[in-house]
């Protein structure tokens, strides 16, 4: 399985480890979830930005309260 290596200072690593522990997760699991969630969020936002003009065009003639 491919891996990602990240260089962190001792202070950064300590903060990351503490945060993961507060979440009840291993640092590795939290890091993976954070990376995947961030990528998924960006993909969703990109799709939403593309869809909004299409949706607005589709309802442009609808009464104001239904747009």
Image (spheres, helix red, strand yellow):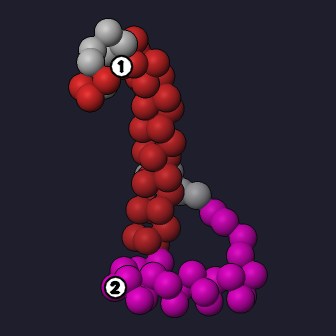
Q: Which mark is residue 12?
A: none
SS class of the residue under badge 1?
helix
Q: Is residue 42 above or below residue 63?
A: below
In percent of width and height, residue 54 lies at: 40, 15
Q: Position of residue 49 (x, y in %)?
A: 49, 29
- Which quadrant of the view contains residue 21? bottom left
Task: Kindly identify the residue that appears in the image at 62 percent across and 89 percent down.
Answer: 14
Answer whether residue 60 is visible to the viewer in this image. yes
Q: Residue pushed farthest front?
A: 64
Q: Is residue 13 magenta?
A: yes
* Location of mark 2 (residue): 24
Q: Nearer the viewer, residue 64 or 1?
A: 64
Q: Residue at x 26, y 18 (%)?
A: 63
Image quarter where the C terminus lies is top left
Q: 10 Å neighbourhood of mark 2: few (<14), some, or many (≥20)?
A: few
Residue 23 drawn at (x, y percent): 38, 83
Q: Residue furthest right?
A: 9
Which residues fall within the magenta stretch?
Answer: 5-27
Q: Tell me the element at label 2.
A: loop
Few, some or many residues within 10 Å of mark 1 (<14, 14–19, 20+):
few
* Label 2–label 1 contact, CB within 8 A: no
Q: CA distance from mark 2 to mark 1?
A: 41 Å
In this view, the residue in front, 57 or 11, is 57
**Residue that mark 1 sits on:** 55
Q: Which residue is at a point 51% across and 90% down the rendered structure image?
A: 18
Closer to viewer: mark 2 or mark 1: 1
Image point 47% across, 62% down: which residue? 34
Sequence order check, earlier mark of 2 and 1: 2
């Amino acid at each position: 399985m491919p891996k990602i290596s990240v260089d962190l200072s001792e202070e950064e690593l300590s903060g990351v480890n503490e945060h993961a522990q507060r979440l009840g997760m291993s640092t590795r699991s939290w890091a993976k979830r954070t990376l995947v969630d961030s990528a998924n969020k960006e993909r969703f936002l990109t799709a939403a930005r593309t869809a909004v003009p299409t949706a607005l065009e589709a309802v442009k003639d609808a009464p104001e309260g239904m747009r």
